[in-house]
Amino acid sequence: MSGMARDLRVEGLAKRFGGLRVLEDVDFTLPPGAVLGVIGPNGAGKTTLINVITGRTPPTAGRILLGSQDVTGWPTHALSRLGVVRSFQQTNTFKTADVRENVARALRFSRGGLDGWTRLVPLLRDFGLADRLEEQSDKLPYGLQKMLGLVLAYAADPQVLLLDEPAAGLERSERSRVDDFVHHVSRQGCSVLIVEHDMDLVRRLCPEILVLDAGAVLARGAVAEVLARPDVIAAYVGADAGDAV
Ligand SMILES: Nc1ncnc2c1ncn2[C@@H]1O[C@H](COP(=O)(O)OP(=O)(O)OP(=O)(O)O)[C@@H](O)[C@H]1O
């Protein structure tokens, strides 16, 4: 990771779509290298939180700061240049391009340019992508397409990485690759926000979690304590019953 590591701060963030309040007064700080899980029932506003932080849609109220820089309302490409980068629930590769071309394109738009290849080699090797560089990305098995999506996000040389359901659709045996990825990038000082329904993965990877319920922060703190709270358990019952507990 190049550049000075900085906190991501979210202050009083709100988002409305017409009359629908999707986020309300969301506050948190993500220090460099921290891994924060964001959980909540379907429709709680988790993806919208990522969309707002990464400039896909502007907030209705509140501020987003990277260090002392106010980046509220910045467009996605400008945030990406600054190091605020996301991955998608569905993979976001150039489907007809091969793996090498996908990585090269991601690097071309990154802060470090093509020099970034060396940074990505360990990840490509660990995910079994290093010997599949000539394969068309949409012909790869789904699990590898998903890992390629993570590599492409990391190719942008992020300071803050926001992962939208990185384990969704992966076989249980493939999910440890997500663990490896998150450990790798957080060791480099990159902070990671993970939206995820797989509670085993959340417990493994996220020392702290934030629970969204109907767009508001219901709880924030150490993962075991928060998941044991009766109000957190209740928020899942009738929504994602069985996922959280
Ligand atoms: N562009 C939009 N216009 C109108 N409503 C939207 C828009 N995007 C999201 N919403 C609404 O905002 C609410 C929150 O959606 P969001 O996708 O953020 O939830 P989520 O917590 O990520 O859910 P899931 O776990 O199912 O992915 C939902 O009611 C959704 O219909």
Image (tube, rainbow, N blue to C red):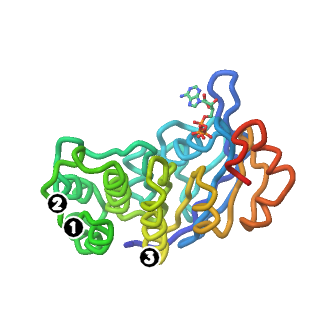
Which residue sits at x=12%, y=56%? 134
Marks 1 & 3, CB-CB < 8 Å contact = no
Marks 1 & 2, CB-CB < 8 Å contact = yes
Up the image or down, 237 lies above or below 207; here it is above
Distance from Cα at disc 1 to Cα at disc 2: 6 Å
Q: Position of residue 63 (x, y in %)?
A: 63, 49
User: Dot 2, crowdedness within 10 Å: few (<14), some or many (≥20)?
Assistant: some
Which residue sits at x=69%, y=22%? 19
> Residue reaching furthest bottom?
187
Q: Quadrant of ligand 1?
A: top right
- Between disc 2 and disc 3, whose residue precedes? 2
User: Dot 1, crowdedness within 10 Å: few (<14), some or many (≥20)?
Assistant: some
> Residue reaching furthest left?
134
**Type of the residue with mark 1:** Ala
**Type of the residue with mark 2:** Leu
Q: Which mark is residue 188?
A: 3
Mark 1 — residue? 130
Classify mark 1 as within 8 Å of ligand 1 or not, answering yes or no.
no
